[in-house]
Amino acid sequence: MRCTCVTPCENMVSRYLAETPNQPRTPPEMTKKSRRKDTVIAHTAMKPWDNVGIPNPPIYYASTVLFPTVEEFETRDRPPFKGVQYGRSGTPTQFAVEEAVTALYEGSHRTVTFPSGLGAIAAATITFLKHGDHVLISDSVYGPTRKRVGANLLERAGIEITFYDPLIGAGIEDLIQPNTRMIYMESPGSHTFEVQDVPAITAVARDRGILTVIDNTWSSAYFCNPFALGVDIVLEAGTKYL
């Protein structure tokens, strides 16, 4: 199937470039109806018409970004600026990865990439929690989530943690306190691989306005879309199946 699709595409690209070498390149229309994930992976974030017909986005190495005018430089941190301003805030290569991951998780708003898994976990928790809050964390989470983010970051910030049985399901309602602000799941869990009843947990959380987060590394977007199960924030390590 791959060979059948690639050859016509290569011919189409070659013919298009030959016939319109100096014209703005607009990709042909492509319907999104009932696209399989394999198709989404093959096409999302690919902009060959902006890159001399090459499907894969180039890798940008840069620490310096130039601006046409001083005025544009001074307004780079304010809307509607959508360009590149510094490597820390992203490059076209990073934006392409984020666009592709967003497309895989149907129903998601956008994706943000981090240089490490712990960085992503820390950002997803401490951004929404403050001193005096309470968070429920699955007892089968990734070890550093429990120790480095939980004990070293959250508890030191005055955030109370309760670790719950990953098979608790709707029974998690009994653990909710007046100051509970987040439920952090990982399914399947690390090491012991319990599969949680995510819909039951998110139903309880939504009734009480509690934010839900899940580490979806073991399932990946290919096998499970937590957004369809009511989860608010999804984390996935890019070093595993992504």
Image (cartoon, rainbow, N blue to C red):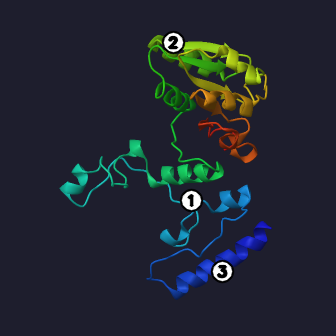
Counting residues from the start of the chain, the first of labels 1 and 3 encountered is 3
**Type of amino acid under label 3:** Asn
Single out the residue that lies furthest toward the bottom: 19
| Location of the N terminus (image quadrant) | bottom right
Q: Which label sits on residue 11?
A: 3
Q: Which residue is mark 1?
A: 45
Task: Determine whether, in the image, residue 126 is placed left or right of residue 75.
Answer: right
Of badges 3 and 2, nearer the viewer stands 2
Compared to residue 6, the image places residue 112 above or below, namely above
**Type of amino acid under label 2:** Glu
Q: Position of residue 76 (x, y in %)?
A: 29, 50
Of badges 1 and 2, nearer the viewer stands 2
| Location of the C terminus (image quadrant) | top right
Q: Residue at x 64, y 32 (%)?
A: 214
Q: Position of residue 164 (x, y in %)?
A: 69, 16
Task: Determine whether, in the image, residue 187 is placed left or right of residue 180.
Answer: right
Q: Residue at x 33, y 54 (%)?
A: 81
Q: How many marks?
A: 3
Badge 2 element? helix
Q: Judge by depth and name the residue closer to the eye, 52 or 173.
A: 173
Q: Position of residue 14 (x, y in %)?
A: 60, 80
- Measured in 3D between alpha carbons, the distance from the residue under mark 1 to the one under mark 3, in whole angstroms, is 21 Å
Instruction: Specify few, some or many for label 3: CA neighbours under 10 Å numbering under 14, 14-19, or 20 or more.
Output: few
- Measured in 3D between alpha carbons, the distance from the residue under mark 1 to the one under mark 2, in whole angstroms, is 39 Å
Q: Which residue is mark 2?
A: 155
Task: Determine whether, in the image, residue 81 is placed left or right of residue 167.
Answer: left
Task: Determine whether, in the image, residue 75 is placed left or right of residue 142.
Answer: left
- Measured in 3D between alpha carbons, the distance from the residue under mark 3 to the one under mark 2, in whole angstroms, is 59 Å
**Type of amino acid under label 1:** Ala
